[in-house]
Every structure is written in structure tokens, then in C-alpha cells.
Image (cartoon, rainbow, N blue to C red):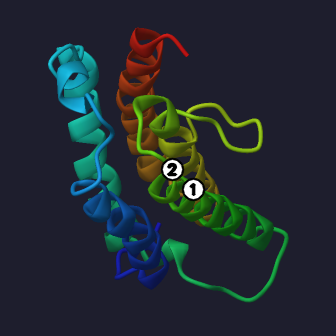
């Protein structure tokens, strides 16, 4: 592991945050009634994971481009998953913005809005051979996917 700025980590975070910022103005109908039911442990794991993933993705240069090798496929897969995440958001923003729209899967991937970024950052951790980021992604994934899974169960889809 090498400390240093990761421009790849920054690109991934921008791809993650821009649609989420737009979403704050386009939340699904009735979203507020589900937020109050969130499990406090899952919420804490999600918040800790968010801070750790954001920080670690930026402070390790291990995620930056290197000469092509077999490891580069991990980065390519991570990028493809981030593109799928952007497609998830495009589909959501064009939808009627219901809770069911927000928690739909994409290409057989359940809870795409929650699982795709977690998968992408885990593959980024593999590419960078960075155990701290992988651990942070697990923490984020348990909280983030757990919360989304609970919401999906509540709406009955």
C-alpha cells in the first residue's frame, strides 16, 4: 500500500456522489416514512463505511492507473460496474420516482442502487490490493445494502 492521492478514487467518488446529490431533489414518493424505521446499527455501519471508503479511496495511490497487467481487469470490471450504477440512476430519474423504482434491480443485480457501488469499490480494493479499503467496503456494504434491503421488504416488492 502506498500513501498518495488517488485520481481514480476521486473519479469513482464523483461518479458516486453526483447522482446522489441530484437524488436529494428527486427522492421517491413516501421516502420519508421509511427513513424513520431504519435500523440504528445498520445506519451506524453505513455512516462509518461511507467515511472510511471516501477517505481510503483518496489517500492511497494504489488505485491509480498502472501499466496493463492481469490486475487491470479488476479495475476494468470496477469501472463497468460504476457505469452500470450511472445507468441505474438515469433509469431512476426518468421513472415516476416511486419507492419500487428506487429499489429495482438492474440486469439481475438486486438493489442495484446499493449493491453496484459496493461491488465497484470492492473491485477497486482488489485492483489496488488494499485490505483497508476492502474492510471499509464490507462495513459500508453491510449497512448500506442492509438498509436498502429492509426498505425493499417494507414496500413489499
Where 131 falls versus 86 (above or below)? above
The one nearer the camera, 51 or 22, is 22
Residue 126 picture quarter: bottom right
Q: What element carries label 2?
A: loop
Left or right: residue 113 compared with residue 19: right
Q: Residue furthest bottom?
A: 67
Where 9 falls versus 123 (above or below)? below
**How many numbered discs sit on the rendered protein?**
2
The one nearer the camera, 87 or 128, is 87
What residue is shown with label 1? 91
Crowding around mark 2 (Cα neighbors within 10 Å: few <14, some 14 to 19, many 20+) is: few
On the question of residue 129 being in view, the answer is no
| Residue ID at (63%, 67%) | 83
| Residue ID at (25%, 20%) | 34
Image disc number at residue 40: none
Q: Distance between the residues labelled 1 and 2?
A: 6 Å
| Residue ID at (46%, 19%) | 152
Q: Do the residues labelled 1 and 2 touch (CB within 8 Å)?
A: yes
Q: Is mark 1 on a helix, strand or loop?
A: helix
The one nearer the camera, 149 or 144, is 149
Image disc number at residue 95: 2
Where 121 falls versus 101 (above or below)? below
Tell me the quadrant of the picture where the C terminus can be found. Answer: top right
Q: Nearer the viewer, mark 1 or mark 2?
A: 2
Residue 43 picture quarter: top left
The one nearer the camera, 88 or 48, is 88
| Residue ID at (24%, 14%) | 39
Q: Where is residue 36 in the image (x, y as percent from the top left)?
A: 14, 19
Q: Where is residue 76 in the image (x, y as percent from the top left)?
A: 73, 70
Left or right: residue 100 compared with residue 51: right
Q: Where is residue 14 in the image (x, y as percent from the top left)?
A: 38, 73
Crowding around mark 1 (Cα neighbors within 10 Å: few <14, some 14 to 19, many 20+) is: some
Amino acid at each position: 500500500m502506498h500513501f498518495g492521492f488517488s485520481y481514480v478514487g476521486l473519479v469513482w467518488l464523483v461518479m458516486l456522489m453526483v447522482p446522489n446529490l441530484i437524488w436529494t431533489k428527486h427522492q421517491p414518493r413516501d421516502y420519508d416514512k421509511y427513513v424513520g424505521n431504519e435500523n440504528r446499527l445498520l445506519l451506524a455501519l453505513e455512516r462509518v463505511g461511507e467515511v472510511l471508503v471516501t477517505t481510503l479511496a483518496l489517500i492511497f495511490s494504489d488505485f491509480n492507473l498502472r501499466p496493463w497487467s492481469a490486475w487491470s481487469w479488476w479495475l476494468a470490471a470496477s469501472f463497468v460496474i460504476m457505469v452500470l450504477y450511472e445507468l441505474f440512476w438515469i433509469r431512476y430519474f426518468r421513472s415516476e420516482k416511486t419507492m419500487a423504482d428506487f429499489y429495482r434491480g438492474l440486469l439481475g443485480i438486486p438493489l442495484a442502487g446499493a449493491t453496484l457501488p459496493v461491488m465497484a469499490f470492492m473491485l477497486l480494493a482488489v485492483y489496488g490490493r488494499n485490505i483497508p479499503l476492502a474492510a471499509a467496503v464490507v462495513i459500508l456494504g453491510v449497512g448500506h445494502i442492509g438498509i436498502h434491503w429492509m426498505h425493499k421488504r417494507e414496500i413489499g416488492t
